Image (tube, rainbow, N blue to C red):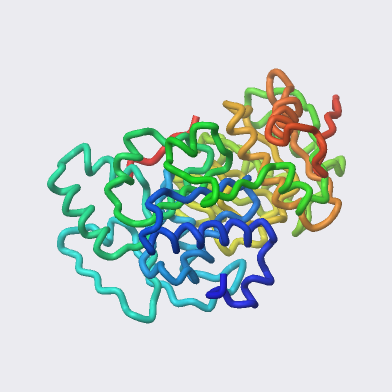
């Protein structure tokens, strides 16, 4: 890691440094023709995968053109913004940031400036769909990409990687680093990864290193109507169970555009506080956004359609989901938005369970125990009683 400035390394957590070190060794051996396998980083949501990605792209001496692929357009957009702005760590590196579409249009010409690192962001579906539609066009796109990149980083999140995507990746002739939120037994063989070129951070290790707080699950009644759900949230606010402040904000997950508007209007009128709405149909006005607002600080309540696991923010201490989490995976991924805020002190974060079965606590605890192998992490769950991804085709 000799290429990495001291002022950058001192801001990284130990697990982030270990991940970078493993991948640096992999990229060096690949470029010295010693190994043509793949690299793998497995880290839980909230553990700083995006910072590791940016550090590798910025300072690995073999990487001047980096293609960052994801399975969701919103995540690709996040990476684009991550490299355009130094919001978390000042990297002091000049990046030329382009989308995959900008690079691969036939009429576009791109020449990288020698003093800039080229970052290309896009979805794996963009390349896969090109391959399915017209092989000749795909070949032209692939040749253009291969001529300007020397590293691929694929952030697959929780997603299993289908063989059709691996086929696309096999046509990119440079080191490939896979980033995932959990590891499967088949990953090493399927992704052609050697153990020495991998770094896996378990939940137990992550919690012991960083987490000081606790998640409290509060069972509530299930509501079918948005206004009834909003009334219950207001009751929690008025009783002090939800104590809103700049560092204790509320997240409400809701996929329906109309329901987001209804809940937002009710809470904004009755709490007299700023409420942020996030949905792809919004037009970025009146505190409504069609994507994650990068510089929004004042809204104490955020009601959102898309996952916010890509947002490295620590002020969210309350989470509710309407009408309820549609899957175990959705609940776990959204709960990690609370975990992000537990690495500073002994804060208690609250997950409000409005599900029919009232089993959010059991689902989260089972997940933590399964990942840790034993219930010994420093983040704990207490349960108290009180009266499928959609993936972008772009």
Pick the quarter of the image with the C terminus: top left
Residue 382: x and y in percent read 84, 33
Taking the spot 75% from the left edge, 23% from the top edge, the residue there is 221
Taking the spot 59% from the left edge, 33% from the top edge, the residue there is 330
Of residues 174 and 383, the one drawn nearer to the viewer in this rendering: 174
Whether residue 237 is visible: no
Q: Would you identify the image quadrant in which residue 345 lies?
A: bottom right
The residue sitting at the top extreme is: 357
Whether residue 325 is visible: yes
Residue 306: x and y in percent read 52, 43
Q: Is residue 344 left or right of residue 74?
A: right
Pick the quarter of the image with the N terminus: bottom right
Examine the rendered structure and indicate whether residue 329 appears above or below residue 299: above
Q: How many marks?
A: 0
Q: Is residue 300 left or right of residue 384?
A: left
Of residues 279 and 17, the one drawn nearer to the viewer in this rendering: 17
Q: Is residue 177 left or right of residue 213?
A: left
Residue 100: x and y in percent read 31, 56
Residue 276: x and y in percent read 60, 51
Taking the spot 47% from the left edge, 34% from the top edge, the residue there is 160
Examine the rendered structure and indicate whether residue 19 appears above or below residue 7: above
Of residues 215 and 59, the one drawn nearer to the viewer in this rendering: 59
Q: Would you identify the image quadrant in which residue 98 lies?
A: bottom left
Of residues 219 and 138, the one drawn nearer to the viewer in this rendering: 138
The residue sitting at the bottom extreme is: 115
């Amino acid at each position: 890691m000799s290429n990495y400035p001291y002022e950058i390394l001192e801001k990284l957590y130990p697990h982030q440094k270990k991940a970078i070190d493993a991948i640096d060794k992999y990229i060096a051996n690949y470029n010295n023709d010693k190994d043509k396998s793949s690299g793998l980083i497995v880290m839980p949501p909230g553990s700083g995968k995006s910072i590791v990605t940016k550090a590798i792209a910025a300072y690995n001496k073999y990487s001047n053109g980096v293609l960052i692929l994801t399975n969701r357009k919103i995540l690709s957009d996040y990476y684009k913004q991550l490299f355009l702005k130094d919001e978390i760590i000042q990297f002091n590196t000049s990046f030329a940031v382009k989308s995959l579409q900008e690079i691969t249009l036939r009429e576009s010409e791109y020449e990288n400036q020698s003093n800039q690192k080229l970052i290309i962001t896009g979805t794996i579906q963009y390349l896969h769909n090109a391959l399915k539609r017209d092989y000749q066009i795909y070949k032209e796109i692939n040749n253009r990409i291969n001529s300007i990149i020397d590293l691929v980083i694929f952030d697959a999140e929780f997603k299993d990687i289908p063989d059709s995507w691996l086929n696309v990746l096999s046509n990119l002739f440079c080191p490939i680093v896979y980033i995932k939120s959990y590891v499967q037994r088949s990953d090493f063989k399927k992704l052609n990864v050697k153990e020495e070129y991998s770094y896996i951070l378990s939940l137990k290790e992550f919690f012991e290193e960083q987490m000081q707080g606790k998640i409290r699950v509060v069972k509530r009644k299930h509501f079918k109507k948005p206004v009834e759900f909003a009334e219950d949230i207001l009751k929690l606010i008025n009783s002090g169970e939800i104590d809103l402040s700049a560092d204790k904000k509320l997240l409400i997950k809701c996929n329906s555009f109309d329901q987001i508007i209804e809940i937002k209007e009710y809470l904004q009128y009755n709490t007299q506080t700023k409420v942020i709405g996030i949905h792809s149909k919004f037009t970025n006005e009146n505190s409504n956004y069609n994507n994650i607002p990068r510089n929004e600080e004042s809204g104490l309540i955020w009601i959102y359609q898309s996952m916010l696991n890509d947002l490295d923010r620590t002020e969210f201490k309350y989470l509710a989901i309407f009408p309820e989490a549609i899957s175990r995976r959705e609940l776990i991924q959204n709960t990690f938005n609370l975990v992000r805020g537990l690495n500073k002190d002994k804060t208690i974060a609250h997950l409000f369970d409005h599900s029919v079965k009232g089993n959010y606590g059991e689902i989260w605890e089972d997940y933590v125990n399964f990942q840790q192998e034993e219930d010994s992490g420093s983040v704990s769950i207490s349960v108290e009683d009180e009266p499928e991804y959609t993936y972008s085709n772009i």
